[in-house]
Amino acid sequence: MLKVFGSFVLFLQNMVSRTERLRVIWRRFMEESILIGVDSIFIVGIVSAFIGAVTCIQIAYNLTNPLIPKSTIGYMVREMTILELAPTITSIVLAGKVGSSIAGGLGTMRITEQISALEVMGINATSYLVLPRILASIFMFPLLVILAMALSILGGYLAGTLSGVMAATDYIEGIRTDFIPYNIFFALIKAVVFAFLVSGISAYKGFYTEGGALEVGAASTSAVTNSIIAILLADYALAAILL
């Protein structure tokens, strides 16, 4: 475990020790931002909207006490979405989509000796291939989490009002009740940390792939598994430290 962690730290150190020109990094950053962020909007939107809708319906199902106001449903949907569901579930979904893509892409480049060719030409392969992916993930994950928050709350609103569980005014009153702006900041911190973990772990697994096509698939699976575990551990640690 310590050997792997040390190797990962050296991998990150090599990535930033001799970087490529800023113009090259910027161009690669924009390319990766499209692949990581823009191409993930659809899946993030679908997952977030249905999570908000299901959360609203399930909370309404359990709140049977007539003394509890209906606005509590909107309040609970908002708090669950901002603090946990939007940043964590979105990052787990992206770990499966983005993490496997990063690991598979770098793994394929490794076994086809494209990375070796870059190194022979004097290019720092980790800086050229990995740094833009990590920067793009750190930039795009918070934006996708903000989108997930909005769509999840909207999904809860549509599910609650269209199903007749509650009135629209009650839901809106609930999401306005006792709002704490720090929760948004906390969710974005989680998104940045999760982005670094997903992109860094996936890039490490893919970059050091050995063997053939079978090993590339194994590296992608390992990257997703380790990223999800890291997300859950970091989720607990951040909640314990920052809340």
Image: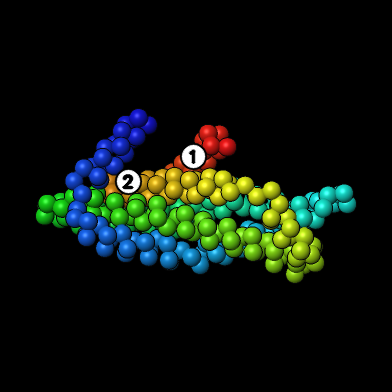
Residue at the spot 76% in from the left edge and 63% down from the top edge: 169
Q: Quadrant of residue 129?
A: bottom left
Residue type for callout 1: Ala
Which residue was labeled with disc 2? 204
Whether residue 128 sits left or right of residue 52 in the image: it is left
Q: Quadrant of residue 32?
A: bottom left
Image height of 211 relative to 36, above or below: above
Q: Position of residue 122 (x, y in %)?
A: 12, 51
Callouts 2 and 1 close, C-beta under 8 Å = no
Which residue was labeled with disc 1? 234
- Location of the N terminus (image quadrant): top left
Q: Mark 1: few, some, or many residues within 10 Å (few <14, many ≥20)? A: some
Q: Position of residue 170 (x, y in %)?
A: 77, 60
Residue at disc 1, secondary structure: helix
Q: Mark 2: few, some, or many residues within 10 Å (few <14, many ≥20)? A: many
Q: Position of residue 147 (x, y in %)?
A: 53, 61
In space, the residues marked 2 and 1 are separated at their CA atoms by 18 Å
Residue at the spot 11% in from the left edge and 55% down from the top edge: 121
Residue at the spot 24% in from the left edge and 49% down from the top edge: 126
